[in-house]
Amino acid sequence: MEPGLSHRNPRVAETARLHRVDERRNRGLTLLEGPHLVEEAVAASEAVVEVYALAEDRAAAAWASRAGAELVLVGEEALKRLSSTQTPQSPVAVLEIPTRGLDASRSVLVAWRISDPGNLGTMIRTAAAFGLDVAVTAGSADPWSPKVLRSGMGGHFQTAVVEVDELDALEAVQVATVMSGGVSPRQLPPGRLAILIGSEAHGLPDEVVVKAGVKVTIPMSGPTESLNAAAAATILAYEASLR
């Protein structure tokens, strides 16, 4: 008999429901999949509350002990149920979603209706790398979904990630990325910026661009018409960090 809880165990089933956005929001919890994310969360002293692991996963036991979390042994089928990948790695942990606020001294990378989890996760990782916080608007992927967390590769634990309804609440100079007619990224103004990155399909709406204090265009010498959201965010975050 396989050691650990089976995929039919009620506790495993309840935890697996955290793949649903409404469950995450209602319970204030999410899932961390794989050793890298769990190790990053523990190293950052995040509130890891449960660690589901295969019996042979000794590292998971050490991380659970360090975090003061409960170690729950599961079988391979249960681990698959807890994970969103086809070939899951032990462990999968339950994390209390952090509630950090934005730092008034840092610029903000704003994800405007970024629906692709990979792009959003990459933007969060990029912001953390270059010293920016992240604001996510309605219509974007859930920033605390397991897929976004995997793409972020620990960036969620190194910067603030918040959801916002009103851009004016950011109290920063709004910088709209536009296809043409904007200033060069090297001409970003001093002070606290809110760098707006538009959706993959439609970019920023006209009303958002009009209200922005600065419009910026990334110059491209090649025939490519545009960059994807994550690539544009990386360039602008880097330029913002140089000011």
Image (cartoon, rainbow, N blue to C red):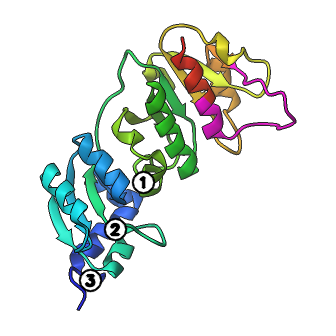
The residue depicted at 29 percent of the width and 55 percent of the height is: 26
Q: Position of residue 27 (x, y in %)?
A: 26, 55
Q: CA distance from mark 1 to mark 3?
A: 24 Å
Q: CA distance from mark 3 to mark 2?
A: 15 Å
- The prevailing secondary structure element of the residues shown in magenta is loop
The residue depicted at 51 percent of the width and 34 percent of the height is: 126
Q: Nearer the viewer, mark 1 or mark 3?
A: 3
Tell whether 235 sits left or right of 151: right
Q: Residue 145's mark? A: 1
* Residue 166 visible somewhere in the drawing: no
Q: Position of residue 114 (x, y in %)?
A: 58, 43
* Three-letter residue code for mark 2: Arg
Q: Give yes or no for residue 100 being in the magenta stretch.
A: no
Mark earlier in primary sequence (1, 2): 2
Mark earlier in primary sequence (3, 2): 3
Residue neighbourhood size for the residue with mark 3, other residues' Cα within 10 Å, grouped as few (<14), some (14–19), many (≥20): some
Q: Give yes or no for residue 231 being in the magenta stretch.
A: yes
Residue neighbourhood size for the residue with mark 2, other residues' Cα within 10 Å, grouped as few (<14), some (14–19), many (≥20): some
Q: CA distance from mark 1 to mark 2?
A: 12 Å
The residue depicted at 35 percent of the width and 81 percent of the height is: 77
Tell whether 218 sits left or right of 67: right
The residue singled out by tag 3 in the image is: 6
Q: Position of residue 31 (x, y in %)?
A: 33, 58
Q: Quadrant of residue 163?
A: top left
Q: 240 and 102: which one is in front?
A: 240
Residue at the farthest bottom position:
1
* Three-letter residue code for mark 3: Ser
* Three-letter residue code for mark 1: Ser
Q: How many marks?
A: 3
The residue singled out by tag 2 in the image is: 17
